[in-house]
Image: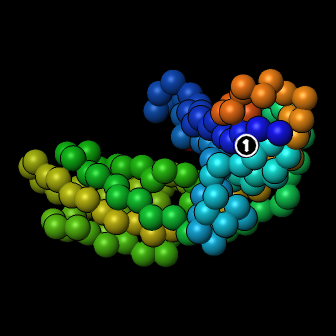
Amino acid sequence: MASSNVRITTQVVQFGTGSDDPYANLHLSAEIDDRDNGLNNGDTDFAPGDSAYFLIYKSSSITLSLPVASAGEVSYQGTTTVRKEDFVTFANEPEGSIEVPASSIASREWIGNSLGDSELVNETTLRLKEVPEGIYAGVLKVTYDAIATVGKLNSKPFADANPDLTDFEIVVVVVGTAGSETTP
């Protein structure tokens, strides 16, 4: 059998078309669990027949369907809390975004200019409590917890696969549906 590697392709989906759209602040994304202490122990390359864990981050009003893989089987394995750190920029705008929906904010620290207190106004948006006068810029280091749904891909061993095929991707499609109770 060839020593092939399997990679999971991920993509972020943004909902809505503008600030007046009730779906504009919804989020759905998936990524391979590459944390050193994560479910894959920091590994991001997998051989055919291996299991690979991935993390799905979603807004609380999104309901997930069972993912589909181009090869192998996918299942959900519950949820886990992931500590994240983002740098949020405020460049003459009173709002900035973190990468994935937060369940709680652990800490905030201004790097350079302090623009004062901020608040989480939805799961991904931070807003300055008081907007400075004139032109302003600041970078806020935000440490937060995010709830991730754990997915597990059981890839198929490709014993009968083309022996010349040494690298290939398995695509996992994650689908979510926005609930009717979504608020902006």
Report whether residue 72 is seen.
no
Residue at left offset 16%, top offset 67%: 112
Structural crowding at the residue carrying mark 1, measured as other residues with C-alpha within 10 Å and reported as few (<14), some (14–19) or many (≥20): few
Which residue was labeled with disc 1? 3
Please name whichever residue, 73 or 78, is drawn nearer the observer in this view of the structure: 73
Three-letter code, disc 1: Ser
Report whether residue 43 is seen.
yes
Mark 1, secondary structure of its residue: loop
Q: Residue 70 sits in which quadrant?
A: top right
Residue at left offset 88%, top offset 40%: 157
Q: In screen coordinates, is 27 left or right of 107? A: right
Q: Residue 128 sits in which quadrant?
A: bottom left
In the rendered image, residue 57, in percent from the top left (x then y), is placed at 65, 50
| Number of on-image labels | 1
**Quadrant (top left, top right, bottom left, bottom right) of the C terminus:** top right
Please name whichever residue, 133 or 57, is drawn nearer the observer in this view of the structure: 57
Q: In screen coordinates, is 23 left or right of 156? A: left
Residue at left offset 29%, top offset 52%: 89
**Quadrant (top left, top right, bottom left, bottom right) of the N terminus:** top right
Residue at left offset 15%, top offset 65%: 113
Residue at the extreme left of the image, as rendered:
134
Q: In screen coordinates, is 100 left or right of 92? A: right
Residue at the extreme bottom of the image, as rendered:
106
In the rendered image, residue 163, in percent from the top left (x then y), is placed at 78, 28
Please name whichever residue, 181 or 178, is drawn nearer the observer in this view of the structure: 178
In the rendered image, residue 171, in percent from the top left (x then y), is placed at 72, 31
In the rendered image, residue 73, in percent from the top left (x then y), is placed at 90, 40
